[in-house]
């Protein structure tokens, strides 16, 4: 699997796929996509990178331990639910704000934070499994 | 603040004290005891405010709602019974805290000890004032847990660990019986509060579930109060430091069972079952405890067995149903707490100051420890039931209750005389013998105890004297309200310290004479009992070990049977069950789907995609090695994803694509990780059933899908989400809006599952084969095989 072409292309392919996964995540509310699908795309990107350039490279690239990423995701999703409680509406009620950035109205919501949490959990949990399997498999 | 809030505060106060105790001890050393003792002292003061109401025979209830929908509340009931208990717990608790300050002076874990004992105090206090069943049960189990911590305080010793575990298993297990009993009472009467229960006595006693409820409640009470044959944990609990023995295992915790029986006496009592079971077990415990006490030479163990005997006496009196038996039980309970607490602390002082606890190796301590001698003698006189101490009043009342002339009264009077005489002998063996006679050399040079140590027992001894001398006041504030609460009707107590000529006094004199005879021949008696016990050989203590070993053996055997540890067995079992459910249910109910109806004009490209899926499956089955099979499974999966796409489910298709890709990658990795042989080596004899199970599962799923799609589609949910997705949740993609908004809490649960699964797989991947062997450590048979 370690062909030169693959190894040369893999970083670009991976970056593109991660970028695409974020795109899919963000557009999810109105078009096909969302945190779960986005997360899966990002995991496949990392798996490709791992197969091409080795697990150590991937671990360095994502910097955090994959399980820490998953934990952060779960934390973010819970916080998204708790914000509603702080605003005195039932747990998990979607709250929206529309701040204006450079003249463009950007809709932000607790729902989006929640979806980002889902994305991170999927990325973290599955890539941690895939990476640990790859690591051992190579021995 | 109102009374309710203050009472809640008083109940929480021991736990607050437990929280600050370690810090305070680090700052002040053993002198922290002076400050920590203020907490229980404040509780005593608070509960004393209820005396006027309670002595008028009223009950005070209060509390807060907990789970109103289940009729569960955090509420308390203060009457003569619970008030006396609360005052004993907090009052003796104050003295015990001071005593532990001196006893564990300089111990590195003294702060922890304070913390445990205060936590226990809070649990016990909560237990006796609880009104609601659930609260009673929670505090009941809390006393078992804190007792476990205290017995195992010296956790580096094997004996302490075993004793702690034994106490936890016996009393905690008994707690489960109690829970079941309370649930039955709840079901029969429909109330969850003790204060409301009193009026349901007749219903309860006539209910067909009465016997079951009674036996379960007795299971809880007898284990907690160390009744024969559950008594063995109590002497073993003497592994705990002496303050614990004095507090938990004589004055308070072991009385919880007696408390429960007294509390339920108006509801469950008075029936033939009650009047047979309680005196029977109580009487047996009384005599066996007293006999075993005589056999011991260790001061603490002697006292422990007499505690057991006293608890038996209390249970017996509670169940007898004679006039004055309840009053006698109330008096004896208070008297016992005072003299036994003091005697235990004296035993602790002797141990602490001389380094010896064996009664045969002690003597002539009176000159070295005059103050301790006075305290010990006063307590022993009270325990022996001699005037002018409170124990005398209690014993006169007991004999007053037992001095009838029918056969039953005479039998129990005889039991009481023998038990009391033996306890008389033990009382003086502990409270008199170490102090008289020639001086015996002890490991440490004997000298008088410091203030912190003698203060507690001295106050208890003074209390035992003053309560008897001021008997009118004692009866008005303590004995009469307590007897009233136990009996469920107004009771008066009139006995005083002046001896009355009559039958009780004769029985009392007989007890004293017999007691003196036993005391003088204690060494011979001890040897005699030891011979008999050696002949019997087996005891419940050994039985407990055998029971525990049997339990572990059984669970190991069961686990071996159910958990073979072979993945193929688990998979086969799972899929056989799936196939059985999928095929069995429709066949059993005759609900097989109708033959599917195919529209004639399926477009060519859809047919092509379906063909690819089928070809993928054939490729899987025909594959020469595992890697090819995995990739071929991917072909089938992608084809299915395309079908989803064609039928208008882009999100589903999208996800399916990603899942298929990742599962092929992960499966391939797992294969290399596990170093499986590339091809499948199953013999034909295994392949045939596997194929059959696979086909059955596939058929079952197919039938289920046909059946499901055969049901007319209910579009109300679709309409709801289409209508509200954009307007309420601001999203056009209904699938995503459902996932993150409408059903967001579901998703939160699901991602938590994803996370936990990830962690589990990660640890499985990291598990090395060597660490599997450690699982066998719990197996008692492992040594035999090795």
Image: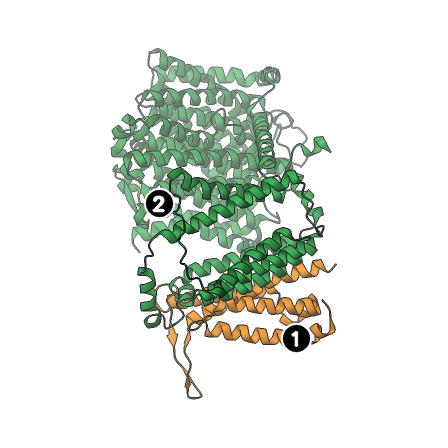
Chain colours: A orange, B green
- Residue found at the very far bottom of the displayed protein: A103
* Residue nearer the viewer, B26 or B506: B26
Q: Which labelled disc corresponds to residue B47?
A: 2
Q: Nearer the viewer, residue B148 or A86?
A: A86
| Residue B169 to residue A25: above or below | above
Q: Which mark is residue B250?
A: none
Provide the secondary structure element on which disc 2 rests: helix
Name the residue tied to disc 1.
A11
Residue lying at 47% horizontally and 52% vertically, measured from the top left: B17
Q: B710 or B774: which is nearer to us?
A: B710
**Is residue B452 visible to us here?**
no
Label 2 close to label 1 by CB (< 8 Å)? no
**Parent chain of label 1:** A
- Label 2 in the same subunit as label 1: no
Within 10 Å of disc 2 (Cα), the crowding (few <14, some 14-19, many 20+) is: some
Q: Estimate the spatial distance between the alpha carbons at disc 2 and disc 1, rounded to whole Å.
A: 75 Å
């Amino acid at each position: 699997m370690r062909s030169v072409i693959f190894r040369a292309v893999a970083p670009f392919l991976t970056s593109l796929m991660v970028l695409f996964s974020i795109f899919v995540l963000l557009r999810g509310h109105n078009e096909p996509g969302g945190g779960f699908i986005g997360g899966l795309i990002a995991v496949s990107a990392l798996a490709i990178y791992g197969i091409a350039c080795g697990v150590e490279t991937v671990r360095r690239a994502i910097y955090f331990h994959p399980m820490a990423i998953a934990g952060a995701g779960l934390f973010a999703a819970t916080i998204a639910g708790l914000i509603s409680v702080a605003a005195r509406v039932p747990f998990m009620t979607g709250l929206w704000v529309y701040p204006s950035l450079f003249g463009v109205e950007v809709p932000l919501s607790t729902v989006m934070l929640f979806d980002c949490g889902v994305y991170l959990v999927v990325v973290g949990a599955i890539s941690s499994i895939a990476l640990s399997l790859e690591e051992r498999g190579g021995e | 603040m109102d009374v309710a809030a203050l009472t809640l505060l008083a109940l929480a106060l021991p736990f607050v004290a437990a929280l600050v105790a370690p810090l305070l001890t680090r700052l002040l050393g053993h002198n922290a005891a002076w400050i920590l003792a203020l907490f229980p002292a404040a509780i005593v003061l608070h509960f004393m405010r209820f005396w006027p109401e309670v002595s008028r025979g009223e009950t005070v209830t209060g509390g807060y709602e907990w789970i109103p929908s289940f009729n569960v509340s955090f509420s308390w009931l203060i009457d003569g019974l619970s008030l006396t208990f609360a005052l004993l717990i907090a009052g003796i608790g104050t003295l015990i805290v001071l005593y532990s300050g001196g006893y564990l002076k300089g111990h590195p874990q003294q702060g922890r000890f304070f913390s445990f004992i205060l936590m226990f105090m809070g649990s016990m206090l909560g237990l006796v004032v609880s009104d609601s069943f659930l609260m009673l049960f929670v505090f009941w189990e809390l006393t078992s847990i804190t007792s476990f911590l205290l017995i195992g305080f010296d956790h580096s010793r094997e004996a302490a660990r075993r004793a702690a575990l034994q106490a936890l298993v016996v009393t905690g297990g008994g707690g489960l019986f109690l829970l079941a009993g309370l649930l039955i009472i709840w079901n029969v009467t429909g109330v969850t509060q003790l204060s409301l229960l009193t009026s349901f006595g007749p219903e309860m006693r006539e209910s067909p579930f009465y016997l079951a409820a009674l036996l379960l409640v007795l299971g809880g009470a007898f284990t907690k109060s160390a009744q024969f044959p559950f008594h063995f944990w109590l002497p073993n609990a003497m592994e705990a430091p002496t303050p614990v023995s004095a507090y938990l295992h004589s004055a308070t915790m072991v009385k919880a069972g007696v408390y429960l029986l007294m509390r339920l006496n108006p509801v469950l009592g008075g029936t033939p079952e009650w009047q047979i079971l309680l005196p029977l077990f109580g009487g047996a415990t009384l005599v066996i405890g007293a006999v075993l006490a005589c056999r011991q030479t260790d001061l603490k163990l002697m006292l422990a067995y007499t505690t057991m005997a006293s608890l038996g006496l209390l249970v017996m009196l509670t169940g007898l149903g004679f006039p004055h038996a309840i009053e006698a039980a109330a008096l004896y309970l208070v008297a016992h707490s005072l003299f036994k607490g003091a005697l235990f602390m004296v035993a602790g002082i002797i141990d602490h100051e001389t380094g010896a606890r064996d009664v045969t190796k002690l003597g002539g301590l009176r000159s070295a420890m005059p103050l301790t001698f006075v305290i010990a003698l006063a307590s022993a006189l009270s325990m022996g039931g001699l005037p002018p101490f409170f124990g005398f009043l209690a014993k006169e009342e007991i004999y007053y209750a037992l001095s009838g002339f029918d056969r039953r009264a005479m039998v129990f009077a005889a039991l009481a005389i023998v038990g009391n005489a033996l306890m008389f002998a033990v009382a003086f063996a502990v409270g008199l013998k170490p102090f008289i006679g020639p001086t015996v050399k002890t490991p440490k040079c004997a000298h008088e105890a410091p203030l912190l140590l003698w203060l507690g027992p001295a106050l208890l001894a003074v209390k035992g004297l003053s309560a008897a001398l001021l008997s009118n006041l004692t009866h008005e504030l303590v004995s009469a309200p307590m007897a009233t609460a136990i009996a469920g009707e107004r009771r008066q107590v009139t006995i005083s310290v002046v001896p009355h000529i009559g039958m009780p006094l004769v029985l009392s004199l007989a007890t004293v004479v017999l007691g003196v005879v036993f005391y003088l021949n204690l060494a011979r008696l001890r040897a005699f009992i030891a011979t008999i016990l050696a002949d019997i050989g087996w005891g419940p203590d050994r039985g407990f070990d055998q029971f525990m070993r049997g339990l572990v053996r059984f669970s190991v055997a069961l686990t071996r049977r159910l958990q073979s540890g072979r993945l193929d067995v688990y998979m086969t079992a799972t899929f056989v069950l799936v196939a059985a459910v999928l095929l069995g249910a429709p066949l059993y109910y005759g609900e097989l789907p109708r033959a599917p109806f195919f529209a004639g004009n399926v477009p060519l490209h859809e047919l092509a995609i379906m063909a690819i899926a089928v070809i993928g499956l054939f490729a899987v089955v025909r594959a020469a090695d595992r890697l090819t099979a995995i990739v071929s499974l991917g072909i089938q999966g992608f084809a299915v994803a395309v079908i989803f796409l064609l039928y208008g489910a882009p999100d589903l298709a999208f996800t399916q694509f990603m899942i298929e890709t990742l599962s092929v990658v992960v499966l391939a990795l797992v294969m290399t990780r596990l170093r499986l042989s590339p091809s499948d080596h199953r013999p034909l004899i295994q392949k045939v059933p596997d194929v059959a199970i696979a086909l059955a599962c596939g058929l079952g799923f197919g039938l289920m899908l046909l059946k499901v799609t055969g049901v007319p589609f209910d579009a109300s949910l679709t309409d709801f989400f289409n209508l509200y997705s954009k307007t309420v949740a601001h999203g056009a993609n209904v699938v995503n809006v459902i996932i993150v908004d409408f059903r967001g809490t579901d998703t939160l649960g699901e991602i938590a599952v994803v996370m936990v699964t990830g962690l589990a797989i990660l640890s499985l991947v990291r598990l090395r084969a060597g660490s599997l062997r450690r699982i066998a450590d719990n197996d008692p048979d492992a040594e035999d095989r090795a």
